[in-house]
Each structure stands twice: as C-alpha cells, then as structure tokens.
C-alpha cells in the first residue's frame, strides 16, 4: 500500500513540476511583452514618426523618422528581390524537378539555409557587396535580408504547390494546356493563399533581423530615400541606442522595440489566422 | 503548338535557374568566408589559431580559443536550462492543459519564438540582468560558491549582471519554445493504444510519460534539441548585449566573456587586416558548426516523425 502511495505522490510531484515549467515559460513571455509595452508605450509619441534623431543632450526631442523609412525600404527591396526568385525556385522543385535527385538535394539545402546564422550571412554580404564597393550601403542590407527570405519562400512554395491535387493538373492537361500554362493558371491560383501566408511569415522574420544589417546597411542619422548609402533601420537603431549612455536614446530604443515587436507579432498572428482559416474553409 | 513548347521550355529554364540560387548562396558563403579567412589561417596556422587564447590588437595576435569556448559554454548551459523546462512545458501542453486552452497556450509558446532576438537582448540587458544580479547571483554565491575547489567559479567578480550566466539564461529563454513545440508534436504522435496499454497495466500518468512517451519520442526530442543548439550557437543580438565581450581568462560563471557572435557584432565594423581575417575565420567556424548541428538534428527528426 505504501508503494502505491509513493507512486501516486511521485505522479503528482512530476506533473506539478511540468505545470510549473509551462508557467515559467509563459510567465517569461508575458514579462517580456509587459516590459516592452510598459517602456515602449511611455515613449511613443507623434514626433517619433515625424522627426529625425536629435542630439542626445536634447531630452525629449527628436524621433526615428528615417529609421522607419529605411526599415520599410530595406524590407520592401528584400521582398522584391527574394520573393519572385523564391517562388520560381520553389516552382521548379515542386513541378519540373519533382522526382529528380537534384530537386531533393536543393530542397534539403534550402531547409538548411533557413537556419544559417544571420550574422554569418551579414559577414558574407559584407565580403561581396560592401568591401568591394567602398562602404556600407542599403542594397547590401536588402540583399542580406533577401538571402534570409529566399529559402523560406522556396520551401513554402514547394510545399504549397505539392499540396495541389494532381487531378487538377490532369484536367488542365486534358484541355490541351502546356505545362507552364497549367502551372501559371491552375497551380499558382490554387496555392496562392498558402504562398501568401509564407511571404507574410518570411517578412515577419526579417522585420526583426539586426545582425545581417549591422555589417551591410549599418546606420545613418539622415536619410534620403535611397539605398545607395548607409541606411538606417529600426533594429540597428535599437541595438545602438539601447547600448548608449543617453537616457533619451534608450527611451527611443524602447519605443522602437515596441513598434518592432508589435509588427512582428501582428504579422505572425495574421499568418496563423490565415492558415487556420484555410484549413477550416 | 511550337510556340507553347518554347514558352514552356523558357519557363522551365527560368525556374531551374532560380533553383540554382540556393546552391550559389550556400557555396558562396563557404567559398567567400574561406577566401577571406586565408590571410589569418596562413599567418597563424589553423591549429595555432584554434588553440591560442590571445586576442591582442596592438601585437596583431589573434586566437579563437576564448570565443570558441565561450560559444560552447553558453550553448551547453542554455541547453541544460532549456531542455527540462521545454519537456515540462510539452507535458503540460499535451497532458494537463484543458483541451479548450491547448491551442491558445501552444500558440503563445510559439509566438515566444517569433520575438526578434534584439528584443530579447534589450530585455536581458535592462530587466533580466539586474534581476539575476540582485536575486539569483548572491544565492548561488552563498551556496555553490562555498564548495571547496570549484567554489570560486560561482563567486561574483564584476558588477553589472553582464556575464556568462545571464547570457546562457537569455539563450535558454530563446530556444525553449522551439524544443517545447517539437517535443509537443512528438508526444502527439505517440499512438494512443500504447499510452492506454500502459495505463491499463496500472501505470500512473507520470509513469506512462516517463516509460512510454519519452522513450517513444526520444529521437525527435534529441533532434529538436540539436537544431535548437544550432540556433543558440549563431544567436547574436541577445548574446552581444549580455555577455560583455571581454577578452580575459574566464574565472567565474558570473564574469563577462566573449562568444563568436559577440566578437563579430562588436568588432567586425572596426576591424581591418589580420583582425578582420580572423573574424571571418570565426564566422566560418560558426557556419560549419551550425551546418553540422542542423544536419544531425534533421536526420534524427526525419527518422522518427
């Protein structure tokens, strides 16, 4: 009887311990969100979006207008480079190369490329796009982000297109359509929702990337809507301002952290909601 | 008819060319980093570079020993902290959590993985590090710090909360969600009949978890942990804030130190010559270590699931 009791107690202890683990995990999530919200919301004001950075001794002045613009431009350029290339490559893997060994290898490599440390990508892009061109530039930053987006888009496109039933293609073939016509008019249309979700999640991923921008687009206080020179971004601004001794800059870093976190979480939640909606409907 | 055929061929070639981009990127990273590393590797020699602790700008003498051991130590400690918490969270999500809340809790854990690492780093620096310094560090110093022989390693040396311990914990917070969701998925794959058989034989819920579910999904958990290890190796922004990037012998768990990523983040932009080449060599080492971890992890995961 004592043995049974011991086992029962052991059961309760172990299960409570795992509940405690979950509590710690969720507790930390809410602690981070709470701290970012608390410190960020206090620092958000209209000037943050409309003014350029002020010298640190001017307490309360200035904003991060150029960082917002730069971040938007970098992300847009990265998506413009990475998304079409990724969809085309994913198309090859899912359609023309479907049963080829080459496609399998590329697919596996793309899987690995998703997890290459982003700082390594930063050093690589520095070597090919910054050093030979004599300085930090926004194009290099966009290229680094595009390299991060690309494998994500390739894998989602491949998976989404492979999920389109083969009968659909056969029906189109039977009408006399050639393969490229079938892909463009039938398969793309069927897989569009899934690919769009993939793009959303990939953009969410690069919106928070800092390390690859540090060595490529770096930072600039003033910015002329062009990627040819150093380009400011919210994440690099957070990194540099948070480590600075000026209270004013730290405050702005929290505000930027709040905006970035809200953006990334919103994109993720939207992407997840779309997936759920598609699975149900 | 032939026009359609040409168009098809054109589209096929276009998609094929696009697929080459993956090979170009992977090969490009490797070749480029190797090329940039050559001056340092030639000057110091590969073994001398790997096993020298010196990192001296004035004498242009650079060795990878400290960043390498720093990365290995923080990653190891992060896994040590994260793995049990992650498995516990997975048990909670699959066994204890009420069905209606499972989806919401699961999503919350996954969202934790989506928060950018620079936010973790900032939070670590301003909130977590002072908290650890004020409450956890003295506690460990007063208990483990009193042990003979190894006690000195648990004594606080420098103030500020910026040290190996904090960096490892921040890393652990970052990789826990990933291990937890892989483990949860693996637990959900365990056939219900297996669990029911164990319960039918009189096993308690915990005994079923420990003797049926965990052994059944051991390989997947291992694979998830190894992939998470790869992430911890290459995590930059969180570590760069809280490790301190100090080039000195490590004399305490609560002392600042350097990792590959902290050295890169702090010194890359100002480096030139041999130092820059040495930094490229560190990046190459990181790339290779991460690739190896991913390869092993994916292999383990695929076999099981």
Image (cartoon, coloured by chain):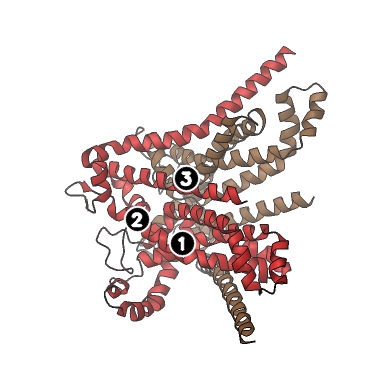
Chain colours: A brown, B red
- When asked about the image quadrant of residue A239, the answer is bottom left
As drawn, the label of residue A116 is 3
A86 up-or-down from B192: above or below = above
Q: Are marks 1 and 3 on the same chain?
A: no
Query: Which residue position is annotated with label 2?
Result: B259
> What is the crowding at mark 2: few (fewer than 14 residues within 10 Å), some, or many (at least 20)?
many
User: In the figure, is residue B148 to the left or right of A65?
Assistant: left
Label 1 sits on residue: B79
Left or right placement of residue A167 versus residue B105 in this view: right
Percent of width and height locating residue B116: 51, 56
Viewer-side residue, A65 vs A38 = A38
* Label 1: element kind: helix
Q: Is residue A59 visible?
A: no
Residue drawn at (54%, 47%), measured in percent from left and top? B298
The quarter holding residue A53 reads bottom left
Quarter location, residue A27? bottom right
Residue most toward the top? B2
Pick whichever of labels 1 and 2 is earlier in the sequence.
Answer: 1
Label 2 sits on a secondary structure element that is: loop
Q: Closer to the camera: disc 1 or disc 3?
A: 1
């Amino acid at each position: 009887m004592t043995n049974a009791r011991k086992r029962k107690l052991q059961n309760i202890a172990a299960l409570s311990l795992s509940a405690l683990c979950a509590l710690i995990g969720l507790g930390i999530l809410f602690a981070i969100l709470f701290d970012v919200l608390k410190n960020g919301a206090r620092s958000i004001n209209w000037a943050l979006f409309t003014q350029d950075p002020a010298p640190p001794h001017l307490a309360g002045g200035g904003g991060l207008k150029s960082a917002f613009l730069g971040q938007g431009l970098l992300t847009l350029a990265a998506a413009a480079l990475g998304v079409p290339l990724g969809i085309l490559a994913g198309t090859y893997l899912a359609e023309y190369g479907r049963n080829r060994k080459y496609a399998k290898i590329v697919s596996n490599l793309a899987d690995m490329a998703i997890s290459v440390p982003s700082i390594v990508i930063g050093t690589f892009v520095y070597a090919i796009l910054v050093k030979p061109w004599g300085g930090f530039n926004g194009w290099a930053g966009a290229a680094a982000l595009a390299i991060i987006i690309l494998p994500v888009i390739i894998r989602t496109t491949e998976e989404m297109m492979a999920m389109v039933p083969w009968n659909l293609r056969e029906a189109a073939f039977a009408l006399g359509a050639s393969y490229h016509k079938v892909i463009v008019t039938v398969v793309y249309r069927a897989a569009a929702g899934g690919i769009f979700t993939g793009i959303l999640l990939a953009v969410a991923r690069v919106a928070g990337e800092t390390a690859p921008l540090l060595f490529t687009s770096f930072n600039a206080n003033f910015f002329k809507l062009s990627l040819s020179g150093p380009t400011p971004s919210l994440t690099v601004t957070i990194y540099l301002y948070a480590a600075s001794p000026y209270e004013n800059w730290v405050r702005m870093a929290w505000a930027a952290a709040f905006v970035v976190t809200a953006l990334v979480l919103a994109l993720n939640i939207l992407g997840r909601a779309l997936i759920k909606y598609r699975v149900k409907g | 008819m032939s026009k359609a055929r040409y168009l098809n061929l054109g589209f096929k070639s276009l998609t094929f060319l696009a697929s080459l981009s993956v090979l170009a990127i992977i090969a490009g990273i490797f070749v480029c980093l190797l090329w940039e590393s050559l001056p340092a590797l030639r000057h110091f020699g590969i073994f001398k570079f790997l096993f020298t602790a010196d990192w001296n700008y004035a004498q242009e003498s650079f060795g990878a020993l400290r960043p390498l051991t720093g990365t290995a130590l923080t990653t190891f400690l992060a896994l040590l902290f994260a793995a049990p918490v992650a498995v516990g969270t997975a048990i909670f999500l699959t066994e204890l959590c009420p069905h209606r809340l499972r989806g919401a809790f699961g999503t919350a854990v996954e969202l934790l993985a989506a928060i950018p690492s620079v936010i973790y780093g900032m939070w670590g620096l301003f909130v977590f590090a002072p908290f650890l310094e004020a409450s956890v560090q003295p506690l460990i110093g007063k208990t483990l710090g009193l042990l003979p022989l190894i006690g000195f390693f648990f004594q606080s040396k420098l103030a500020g909360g910026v040290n190996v311990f904090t960096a490892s914990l921040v890393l652990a917070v970052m990789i826990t969600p990933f291990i937890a969701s892989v483990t949860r998925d693996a637990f959900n794959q365990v056939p219900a009949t297996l669990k029911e058989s164990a319960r039918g034989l009189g096993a308690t819920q915990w005994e079923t978890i420990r003797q049926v579910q965990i052994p059944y999904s051991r390989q997947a958990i291992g694979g998830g942990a190894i992939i998470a290890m790869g992430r911890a190796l290459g995590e930059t922004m969180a570590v760069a804030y809280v490790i301190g990037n100090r080039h000195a012998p490590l004399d305490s768990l609560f002392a600042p130190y350097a990792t590959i990523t902290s050295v890169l983040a702090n010194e890359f932009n100002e480096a030139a010559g041999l130092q820059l080449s040495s930094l490229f060599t560190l990046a190459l080492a990181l790339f290779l270590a991460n690739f190896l971890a991913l390869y092993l992890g994916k292999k383990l995961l695929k076999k099981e699931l």
